[in-house]
């Protein structure tokens, strides 16, 4: 019984715990490692392409919003000088025609809900 140890009433055998590793061919192991590395690089490349596309779409959206903001700033400065820009006149005349055909109801959040025969719009 020199191979067996008694620890807290249990019999322990010397050696490693768990399964013994199988004899793996070194070349096959290296090939699997290379293949895994190739797949990892391909996933990384796809991830970076996706992120680059996402960034470029967000940058385009930011540019469009900046242009819209600049347009609104110009409208405000024109209105401060007492002029009404033609774009606003067109919007107002277009809205006047719609409001004569529709009814307006305030909603719970305080916005006015415009509804007509087949259209609905929140202001």
Image (spheres, rainbow, N blue to C red):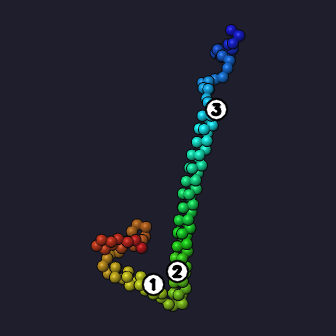
- Under circle 3, the secondary element is helix
Please state if 13 lies on the left or on the right of 78 as rendered.
right
Look at mark 2 in the image and give the residue it sits on. Answer: 71
Residue that extends furthest to the bottom in the rendered view of this protein: 82
Q: Is residue 26 visible?
A: yes
Q: Quadrant of residue 47?
A: bottom right
Seen from the viewer's position, the closer of residues 102 and 29 is: 29
Query: Which residue is drawn at the image coordinates 55% and 79% (left, top)?
Result: 70
Percent x, y of residue 24: 61, 29
Q: Residue 26: give its label.
A: 3
Query: Which residue is drawn at the image coordinates 45% and 87% (left, top)?
Result: 86
Residue that extends furthest to the right in the rendered view of this protein: 2
Percent x, y of residue 50: 54, 57
Percent x, y of residue 46: 55, 53
Q: Is 67 located above or below residue 9 in the figure?
A: below
Q: Is residue 105 visible?
A: no
- Look at the image and tell me in which quarter the N terminus lies: top right
Circle 2 Cα neighbour tier, 10 Å, few/some/many (<14 / 14–19 / ≥20): few
Query: Which residue is drawn at the image coordinates 37% and 82% (left, top)?
Result: 94
């Amino acid at each position: 019984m020199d191979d067996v140890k008694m620890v807290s009433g249990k019999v322990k055998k010397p050696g490693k715990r768990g399964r013994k590793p199988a004899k793996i061919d070194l070349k096959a192991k290296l090939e699997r490692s290379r293949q895994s590395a190739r797949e990892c690089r391909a996933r990384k490349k796809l991830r970076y392409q996706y992120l680059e596309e996402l960034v470029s779409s967000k940058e385009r959206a930011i540019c469009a919003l900046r242009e819209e903001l600049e347009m609104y700033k110009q409208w405000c400065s024109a209105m401060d000088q007492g002029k009404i820009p033609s774009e606003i006149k067109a919007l107002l005349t277009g809205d006047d025609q719609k409001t004569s055909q529709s009814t307006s109801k305030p909603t719970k959040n305080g916005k006015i809900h415009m509804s007509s025969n087949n259209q609905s719009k929140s202001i």
